[in-house]
Image (spheres, coloured by chain):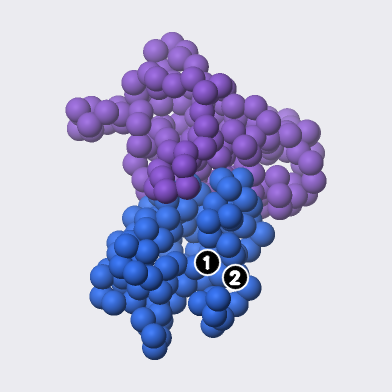
Chain colours: A blue, B purple
Amino acid sequence: MIEIEVDRREGGIGVVVPKGRLNMVSARQLKELLGELVSSGATRVVVDLAETTFLDSSGLGAIIAGLKSARQAGGDLRIARPTATVLTVFQLTNMDKVLRPRDDVDTAFDD
Amino acid sequence: MTEERPPGTAHRHLSAPAVPDTVDLAHHELELLWAETPQVGDLDRMRFELAVVEVLANIVEHAYGEEHDDAHGARGVELDLAVEVDRLVAVLHDDGVRAELDLSRVSMPGEDAESGRGLALTLATVDELEYRREDGRNLWRLVCLRHS
């Protein structure tokens, strides 16, 4: 089970907070949500992973799909505050190079 | 009759349809397993849980082809999870089609790929991963040696 909060901010920024496990069930939900967010104009997306307790390859795939749609729309996707468990998945798949984790949600788009 | 087990070890079994929601059931079984074995370290739990969920997701996605008839109730998966003295072991059985893969050739796909990382991630996580056909069924066995 997962709950995904969305906070739309100024400057076309959307903050997405998945609370719970990102597995093959919830990844579909996240992928749809990210797609809708980008097409509605929030092309700069922050996925705040502070409350994501588990991430597998399908959850990672949903984030990569979101990254691709954000970039196609002229924006970007950043990840913030992953827990040690979730960070390990980024490291094992080498995706931490592409999606460099940010320490803070509010400053995720400062650079 | 209760089976005698060494202290600090535990076993759980799950038999369920090979559908996405069963992944959530597997997470729940793992929570129950950890509740029985609080001495298993966080890192070991994480590695094992990730590997179990990835292999299970692979079965859900690939074991039963599109044409497989769900109505006959044969679209099942069985999961055995064990905490042993020095290792965590999961065995998954399903009645689906043979998995056409060579585990020695599994590699991480490119950074743009939205899928195809499951088994590569599993291999990066476990100490042993085995797939074989046994009595006309698929058998996956994965082992994480306990470090913490």
Q: Residue at x 68, y 31 (%)?
A: B127
Q: Residue at x 41, y 45 (%)?
A: B113
Vertical arrangement, residue B82 with respect to residue A20, above or below: above
Query: Above or below — where is A91 with respect to A9?
Result: above
Read off the chain for label 1: A
Q: Residue A101 appears in which quarter of the rendering?
A: bottom right
Dot 1 or dot 2, earlier in sequence: 1
In the rendered structure, are the residues bearing label 1 and label 2 in contact, judged by CB atoms less than 8 Å apart?
yes
Q: Quadrant of residue B133?
A: top left
Q: Residue furthest bottom?
A: A10
- Residue at image mark 2: A102
Image point 52% across, 37% down: which residue?
A: B108
Which residue reaches farthest top? Answer: B135
Q: In what quadrant of the picture does the N terminus of chain A appear?
A: bottom left
3D distance between C-alphas at marks 1 and 2 = 6 Å
Label 1: how many Cα within 10 Å (few below 14, some 14–19, many 20+): many
> In the image, residue A27 lies at what x, y percent?
39, 55
Q: Which chain is mark 2 on?
A: A
In this rendered view, identify the residue nearer to me: A102 or B2. A102
| On screen, residue B54 above or below A9 | above
Q: Which residue is mark 1?
A: A79
- Percent from the top left, x then y, of residue B52? 54, 39
Front residue of this view, candidates A33 and B19: A33
Count of picture labels: 2
Q: Secondary structure at mark 2?
A: loop
